[in-house]
Image (tube, coloured by chain):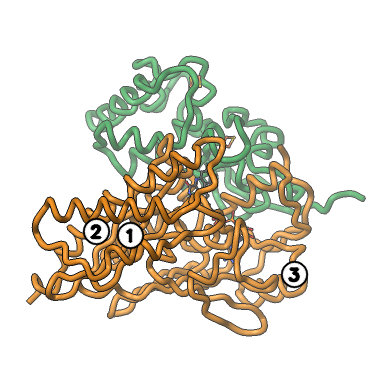
Chain colours: A orange, B green
């Protein structure tokens, strides 16, 4: 339960951090919050020769919000800051709702959003949320910078599109259009545990109340976030209106479509069947919540 | 080959300390074995149990998930910074009065977590206390008396103010 030996580097600039990573490649790991990396090292599941500590690179500790509501969340921005930031709450309530389900307060005080995404644990809430929000993930290296859509970033368990010399420098989130409603729901055995199943929902209603866009993404349902096109198809073009019975039927149908379209792996804590059942129930509830929130922000109201 | 040593300067409970450490030395082991401050307990060494929780620059963090070398230029506080047996910190007095501990293994981590929590939330309700306690496991008490102790400490702080 003690980590293996490694060399420690503490760069104070981004350029220095990137040069070190380019030099050491896969032998080196960036150290952000350490809330996933250090447990893995203590278990000796990973044995990096070099750790490049990002905590002294002040440029990465940056959370920006443009006048239009576009958010940029830098590599050193910790879960606790995202969770309590007013601009994030205003523009990206889905991220805040999900991040509150991540781990415990002490872990959120150190852990970072970018570190969580780079870790790419398929059970994690946040990759699913990034896919639902169509986040752009900005990777930098000494070779330059590129932007990776969240849907392409997650490539398997603990596997991302990042090259060995690349740093995930920033997450970029565009503001949600008027008439958007979101919700995140999960079930875990205890607060702070990884979810047995989690569902992120984003719905968009036009001025007539018709659903023009729907995204339903699960965590824990595969080796990466699982977006269900079948569920989105049930929701898209529906006009939920104000009839509660019709709305309930629509949400139930969407939940059933989700359960039928996923093939969850099951874990020691939860069977695949139960995961599918949870997906169905959580999705129906989350979709109902998202419709309610979308209606509260619909273009009709704001006229 | 002798492992490379890294010089660090860290403020521990208000006192500046200097040391040479191997990079892989966990902060929890540095605190216990090098500084002899054995109030910080170690349960799981992977961030789950909360027994090792200390304040890092005033913020609760797992000492088992930090390397000592990372604390260079920072300040940490451990349970030894709270009260003395003669003059208990209000949180410690409340835990004693409410029977908020049995074996005491989890207690230092809980006290440090609750110290920061009460500073930010001086008047918490029970639900908020339980949420704030979610990252600290206790095998003995069943939590009822811990929650009562934290409420008592909050009330004591208000009376004292
Ligand atoms: C008890 C406990 C419970 C937890 N529960 C949950 C949970 O319920 N849900 C959940 O999602 N997570 C959970 N976590 C994990 C937590 O969210 C971590 O904070 C997060 O996954 C990793 O962020 P970090 O900044 O700590 O990254 P680190 O641990 O520092 O790094 C993780 C990995 O990403 C790499 N990395 C870090 N930053 C970058 C970067 N900017 N660019 C490229 N690579 C980078 C590192 O090299 C490493 O391989 C839990 C952790 C603990 C200890
Ligand atoms: S010993 Fe650090 S959390 Fe358990
Ligand atoms: S008092 Fe024994 S573990 Fe909490």
C-alpha gap between disc 2 and disc 1: 7 Å
Q: Label 3's element? A: helix
Considering only order in the chain, which callout, 1 or 2, is on the residue closer to the N terminus? 1
Q: Is residue A195 left or right of residue A2?
A: left
Is the same chain shared between marks 2 and 1?
yes
Q: Which mark is residue A259?
A: none
Q: Label 1's element? A: strand
Q: Quadrant of residue B46?
A: top right
Q: Is residue B1 above or below residue A291?
A: above
Residue named by callout 1:
A201
C-alpha gap between disc 2 and disc 3: 43 Å
Q: Residue at x 51, y 50 (%)?
A: A123
Residue named by callout 3:
A25
Q: Are marks 2 and 1 in contact (CB under 8 Å)?
A: yes
Q: Nearer the viewer, mark 2 or mark 3?
A: 2
Q: Is residue A297 above or below residue A280?
A: below
Chain containing the residue with disc 3: A
């Amino acid at each position: 339960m003690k980590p293996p030996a490694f060399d420690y580097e503490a760069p104070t600039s981004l350029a220095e951090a990137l040069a070190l990573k380019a030099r050491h490649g896969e032998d080196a790991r960036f150290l952000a919050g350490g809330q996933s990396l250090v447990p893995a090292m203590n278990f000796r599941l990973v044995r990096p020769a070099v750790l490049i500590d990002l905590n002294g690179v002040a440029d990465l500790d940056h959370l920006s919000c443009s006048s239009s509501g576009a958010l940029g969340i830098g590599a050193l921005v910790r879960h606790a800051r995202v969770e309590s930031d007013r601009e994030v709450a205003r523009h990206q309530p889905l991220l805040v709702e999900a991040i509150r389900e991540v781990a415990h307060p002490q872990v959120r005080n150190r852990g970072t959003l970018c570190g969580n995404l780079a870790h790419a644990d398929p059970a994690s809430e946040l990759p699913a949320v990034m896919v639902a929000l169509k986040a752009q993930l900005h990777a930098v290296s000494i070779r330059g910078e590129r932007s990776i859509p969240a849907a392409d970033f997650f490539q398997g368990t603990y596997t991302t599109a990042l090259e060995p010399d690349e740093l995930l420098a920033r997450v970029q989130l565009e503001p949600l259009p008027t008439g958007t409603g979101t919700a995140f729901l999960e079930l875990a055995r205890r607060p702070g545990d990884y979810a047995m199943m989690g569902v992120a929902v984003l719905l968009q209603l036009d001025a007539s109340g018709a659903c023009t866009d729907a995204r339903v993404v699960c965590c824990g349902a595969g080796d990466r976030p699982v977006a269900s096109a079948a569920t989105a198809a049930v929701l898209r073009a529906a006009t939920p209106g104000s009839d509660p019975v019709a709305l309930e039927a629509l949400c139930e149908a969407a939940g059933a479509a989700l359960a039928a379209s996923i093939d969850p792996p099951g874990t020691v804590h939860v069977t695949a069947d139960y995961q599918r059942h949870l997906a169905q129930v959580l999705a129906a509830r989350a979709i109902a919540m998202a419709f309610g929130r979308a209606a509260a922000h619909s273009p009709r109201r704001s006229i | 080959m002798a492992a490379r040593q890294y010089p660090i300067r860290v403020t521990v409970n208000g006192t500046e300390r200097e040391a040479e450490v191997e990079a892989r030395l966990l902060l929890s082991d540095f605190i216990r074995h090098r500084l002899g401050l054995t109030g910080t307990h170690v349960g799981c060494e992977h961030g789950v149990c909360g027994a090792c929780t200390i304040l890092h620059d005033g913020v609760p963090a797992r000492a088992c998930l930090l390397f000592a070398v990372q604390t260079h230029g920072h300040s940490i506080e451990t349970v030894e910074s709270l009260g003395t047996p003669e003059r208990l910190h209000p949180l410690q007095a409340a835990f004693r009065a409410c029977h908020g501990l049995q074996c005491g293994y989890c207690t230092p981590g809980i006290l440090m977590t609750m110290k920061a929590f009460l500073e930010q939330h001086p008047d918490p309700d029970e639900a908020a206390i339980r949420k704030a306690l979610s990252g600290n496991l206790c095998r003995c008490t069943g939590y009822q008396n811990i929650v009562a102790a934290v409420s008592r400490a909050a009330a004591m702080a208000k009376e004292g103010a």
